[in-house]
Image (cartoon, rainbow, N blue to C red):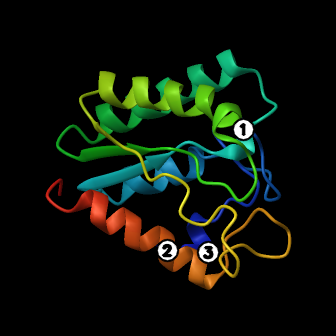
Amino acid sequence: MGPAELQRAGGGFVAVGSTNADFNGQIDQAIAAKANVVLIGASDNDLGQDDAAVAKAMTAAVERLSDALPKARLIGYNALTGEASDSDLAPLNDALKQAVTAAGGTWIDLGQPYRGQVGLVQDDGEHPTLEGQQAIASVVLSRLDGIV
């Protein structure tokens, strides 16, 4: 699986992205690959969707992963964004954290490693630059140290 195969621009747990897909295709790929470690993050693409519907979809996704990959290490993390506020993201993050921990997974808080950082956010104000992606990777690696 290459990064392009996993990309679902604009997609979320409920939100359908530019490829007319949500996260279900990525879940299918993780299951097909028999992943040992699965990182699953909340998405600001689900902002504006019904919170209850998003929470239900998150729970279904996590349960599907947990059932199909019972030996896999499931690690959930907060939504990353260039512009949404922590309070806007809280319902999404809380719902995923609850689903992941209920399934026996681990929750990590990545903070917002590129939000508001000059040179780390693209001109659209939302998406990370290459340097922003590297900032995310650095935080992920530090949070995973000792977990996996």
Q: Which residue position is annotated with label 3?
A: 4
Left or right of 137 in this view: 85: right
| Amino acid type at mark 2 | Ala
Kindly report which numbered mark, 1 or 3, lies closer to the viewer in this rendering.
1
Relative vertical location of residue 128 with respect to residue 34 in this rendering, above or below: below
Quadrant of the image containing the C terminus: bottom left
What separation in Å lies between label 2 and label 3 (alpha carbons)? 20 Å
Mark 1, secondary structure of its residue: helix
Q: Residues within 10 Å of mark 2 (few under 14, many from 20)?
A: some
Mark 1 or mark 3: name the one nearer the start of the chain: 3
Q: Callout 1: 10 Å neighbours few (<14), some, many (20+)? A: many
Query: Please, what is the three-letter code of the amino acid marked with disc 3?
Result: Ala
Q: CA distance from mark 1 to mark 3?
A: 21 Å
Seen from the viewer's position, the closer of residues 6 and 50 is 50
Q: Secondary structure at mark 3?
A: helix
* Residue 135, disc: 2
Q: Nearer the viewer, residue 113 or 6?
A: 113
